[in-house]
Image: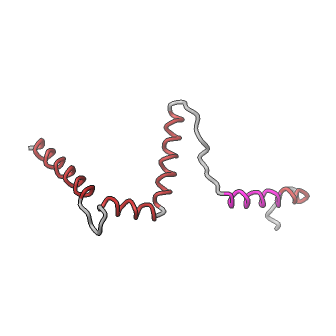
Amino acid sequence: MGFVRGVVWTAGAVALGVGLATVEIDGKTPLAHARKAWERAEAGEWLKDRAEQVMDKARGAVGQPQQPRERHSDEDRAALDRIIAKRSGNSGSGGNTASH
């Protein structure tokens, strides 16, 4: 009975895939609607970043060089540079920033 159940589920999944790829709703397939919604959402960038991190981790596991894990925008880098410049300019305080 398990074999028949597997065949039925496989056939259903294939039929669903064919339906999503071929049936048109408002002039586009459901797959095209989903792709357009995905491109507008921020989830696409998040997933892309996560996939890159996983690939980097896998490269490290097999001994290939890894890319840096942190991704900073130009705005973030400029803010970090300002913080570093401010702290290095206060070298006379002995490194104690709690008094500020």
Q: Which of 34 and 69 is in front in this view?
A: 34
Q: Residue furthest front?
A: 27
Which color scheme did the rendering employ for the protein?
A: secondary structure
Q: In this view, does 87 lie to the left or right of 22?
A: right
Q: Where is residue 20 in the image (x, y as percent from the top left)?
A: 26, 57
Q: Is residue 77 magenta?
A: yes
Number of numbered markers: 0
Q: Answer above or below: position of 91 versus 37.
A: above
The residue shown at (13%, 48%) is: 8
Q: Answer above or below: position of 100 versus 21.
A: below
Q: Which residue lies furthest to the left in this view?
A: 1
Q: Where is residue 45 in the image (x, y as percent from the top left)?
A: 50, 57
Q: Answer above or below: position of 65 versus 20.
A: above
Q: In this view, does 40 lie to the left or right of 6?
A: right
Q: In which quarter of the image is the N terminus?
A: top left
Quadrant in which residue 2 is drawn = top left
Q: Residue furthest right?
A: 92
Q: Which of 50 and 99 is in front in this view?
A: 50
The residue shown at (45%, 65%) is: 40
Q: In this view, does 61 lie to the left or right of 76?
A: left
Q: Does the magenta stretch include residue 79?
A: yes
Q: Taken as a whole, is the magenta stretch helix, strand or loop?
A: helix
Q: Position of residue 72 (x, y in %)?
A: 64, 54
Q: Quadrant of the C terminus?
A: bottom right
The residue shown at (45%, 64%) is: 41
Q: Position of residue 7 (x, y in %)?
A: 14, 44
Residues in magenta, as a range: 74-87
Q: In this view, does 20 lie to the left or right of 36?
A: left
The residue shown at (69%, 61%) is: 75
